[in-house]
Image: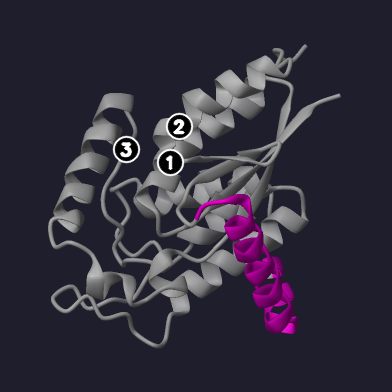
Amino acid sequence: MSLRFELYWSFRSPYSYLATPRIVELVREYDVECELRPVYPIAIRTPEFFEKVNPLWPPYLVRDTIRVAQMNGIPYGWPQPDPVVQDVATREIASEQPYIRRLTRLGIAAVERGRGIPFIEQVSRVIWGGDVKGWNEGSHLADAAKRAGLDLAELDAAIEADPEGYEAKIEANQEAHTAAGHWGVPTCVFEGEPFFGQDRLDHLFWRLSQHGLAPRG
């Protein structure tokens, strides 16, 4: 029987994006299932976070994510536009958030259709890969969804028909995330044990191996 772990993941998190290729490889190469559980980023869940965070944190995050991307050969650049509408100078989070709400709901819809991991792989590459300006315009998202085996128009229509239902599913993921013992993303949870950060994937692999993780085939 395949092992199984949960992945709490955000479309605004650079570390979620940077972890995705390794998650994809793990699921492809080993007999393990990943239950994707999209959540809103901390900017939406806890907007006051940016009022209290040490001012050294944002520039360090930029430096560190660039370094991680370079070390692992992952295309990377801060999204244009940012999935979260935020004043760069004041760090204030806008009340209207059209990008991140749509993306997170789309992530839920993709999971419901059994294509969650391919969807975040393709869409996060468009958003965070550094070579697409205006990822929200034209056919960028539709093309990414198609590469993941999905129809963007069908996903959007399903969400439009039941927006409250999709919000409830996101909230359920966020509650489960907290119950698992962490608040940040990406967080993987195996057998009730949380592994926070793209730098804890080796620890996850080690724990899975202790429970009989085996190559596919």
Crowding near the residue tagged with mark 1, few <14, some 14–19, many ≥20 C-alpha atoms within 10 Å:
some
Rendered view: 4 above or below 30: below
Rendered view: 79 above or below 102: above
As drawn, the residue found furthest toward the right would be 1
Q: CA distance from mark 3 to mark 2?
A: 21 Å
Q: Which mark is residue 200?
A: 2
Q: Nearer the viewer, residue 146 or 183?
A: 183
Secondary-structure class at tag 1: loop
Q: Nearer the viewer, residue 109 or 68?
A: 68
Secondary-structure class at tag 2: helix
Q: Nearer the viewer, residue 25 or 2?
A: 2
Where is mark 3, residue-wise? 75
Q: CA distance from mark 1 to mark 2?
A: 5 Å
Secondary-structure class at tag 3: loop
Q: Amino acid at mark 3?
A: Pro
Chain-order first, disc 3 or disc 1 = 3
Q: Which mark is residue 197?
A: 1
Magenta span of residues = 154-182
Q: Position of residue 57 (x, y in %)?
A: 19, 55
Main SS class of the magenta portion in the image: helix
Answer with left or right where residue 178 lies relative to residue 69. Answer: right
Residue at 39% in and 61% down: 135
Q: Is residue 123 magenta?
A: no
Answer with left or right where residue 93 lies relative to residue 214. Answer: left
Contact, mark 1 vs mark 2 (Cβ under 8 Å): yes
Specify whether residue 151 is in view. no
Answer with left or right where residue 42 lies relative to residue 175. Answer: left
Specify whether residue 74 is in view. yes
Q: Amino acid at mark 1?
A: Gly
